[in-house]
Amino acid sequence: MPEQWVVNASPPIILGKIGRLDLLTQLPQEIVVPDAVAAEIIAGPEGDAARLAIQTNMFKTVRPPEIPVELASWDLGLGETSVLAYAIAHPGWVAILDDGTARKCAKTFEIPMKGTLAVLILAKNTG
């Protein structure tokens, strides 16, 4: 079943470095990047593939909903918090993130999640 993904900064940055940003547009049915994550990526180096992808609107950017108090108490970065807030407000969406604490938080909130490695494995398994 096709998935809908809300993506943090590290997966597109890593996949951009290996020339496989296309996986983020080919594997899920839909993908969004919260504004805070887009800003974090754009602050990266000139010529970075992930930065260029954001600047050319390869990914739809979204404003996350209000941050639940319980989520804010985890004191994660703004990007991770935005990804998880979006996933909480949109049940069934998969959070794509690599940060260990953010992944523990996602598990606590029962948010489905994958990391960059899982994206690569999914790509391999689907050909």
Image: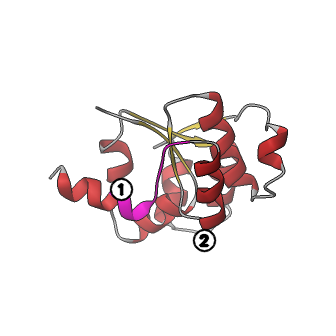
Which residues make up the magenta segment?
A: 111-119
Describe residue 38's horizontal placement relative to residue 29 as left or right.
right
Location of residue 111 by image quarter:
top right
> To which residue does mark 1 refer?
119
Residue 4: x %, y % from top left: 43, 35
Location of residue 33 by image quarter:
top right
In this view, the residue farthest toward the left is 127
Magenta stretch holds residue 31: no
Three-letter code for the amino acid on which mark 1 is drawn: Val
> Do the CB atoms of the residues marked 1 and 2 lie less than 8 Å apart?
no
Describe residue 78's horizontal placement relative to residue 90 as left or right.
right
User: Closer to the camera: disc 1 or disc 2?
Assistant: 1
Residue 28: x %, y % from top left: 36, 39
Residue 72: x %, y % from top left: 82, 48
Residue at (64% x, 43% y) in the render: 109
> What is the secondary structure assignment of the residue under circle 2?
loop
Location of residue 86 by image quarter:
top right
What colour scheme has been applied to the protein in the rendered image? Answer: secondary structure
Q: Nearer the viewer, residue 11 or 39?
A: 11
Relative to 20, say whether 64 is above or below: above
> To which residue does mark 2 refer?
45
